[in-house]
Image: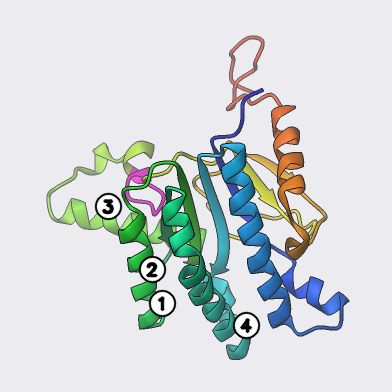
Amino acid sequence: MSLPKHIAIIMDGNGRWARARGLPRAVGHERGVEALRRTVEAAGKMGIEYLTLFSFSTENWRRPAEEVNALFGLLRAYVKRDLERLKAEGVRVRIIGSRENVPADILELIGKAERETEANRRGNLTIAFNYGGREEIVRAARALAQNVIDGALLPEDIDAEQFASVLDTSMLPDPDLLIRTSGEARISNFLLWQIAYTELVILDVLWPDFDGDHLAGAITAYQQRERRFGALAEEGRADG
């Protein structure tokens, strides 16, 4: 059975994991980074070509400043610690999302990670940081509107393909599988355009406990489904 080419993951449950153990939320986020490392390693061994992880949303700015700063610190630590390994393993790193309000040193780290891995071809790790699906769509609409104003594009030439070309994920195929941990059955403003026909797998495990076995189980669930993309498999007619 074929593997999904692109897996996206909403990493949820760090706070609940910490609360259940009487630990600060920051400890949950630290353990979440460990789970991230395990997942990237497992996906590489399984031959997953594209992996996209939701690490910090535009809505996360509403959290206490101490927690936001801790999340920034974890991104710094992850890039500094793991970049050389990712480079050696041939993984290309991309960070998608808005660059507004992101500290200058993190922007520098992001640029470094993307520059130093852009020639890699054995895997693709995309981290959605300061990302929101609606905000991404608004930015894309503004970019197309500016192209029309500049005379580079006619309104009637805007179609789904043209729109996708100005999204943050223009260089990626749409996800085949979206995994959400912690048992919550919602999308949380993640890849709203891109997951139109993505298979969803909701897992009860909290993100800090996620490992390669959970990833393999989600892939098995995906492989047992029949993807139709809006058509009836047996007749090729549109659903109605």
Q: Is residue 199 above or below residue 107?
A: above
Residue 229: say if magenta. Answer: no
Comparing marks 3 and 2, which lies closer to the viewer?
2
Gap between marks 4 and 2 measured at Cα: 22 Å
Comparing marks 3 and 1, which lies closer to the viewer?
1
Q: What span is in magenta?
A: 163-170
Comparing marks 3 and 4, which lies closer to the viewer?
4
Residue under numbered circle 4: 63
Q: Is residue 228 above or below residue 49?
A: above
Residue under numbered circle 2: 110
Q: Position of residue 160 (x, y in %)?
A: 38, 38
Residue under numbered circle 1: 106
Q: Is residue 16 above or below residue 162?
A: below
Comparing marks 4 and 1, which lies closer to the viewer?
1
Instruction: Identify which residue, 163 or 145, lies in the foreground.
Output: 163
Residue under numbered circle 3: 144
Instruction: Identify which residue, 50 or 222, lies in the foreground.
Output: 50
Dot 1 lies on which element? helix
Gap between marks 3 and 2 measured at Cα: 26 Å
Q: Is residue 178 left or right of residue 85?
A: right
Res 235 → quadrant? top right
Circle 3/circle 1 CB separation < 8 Å: no
The answer to which of marks 3 and 2 sits earlier in the sequence is 2
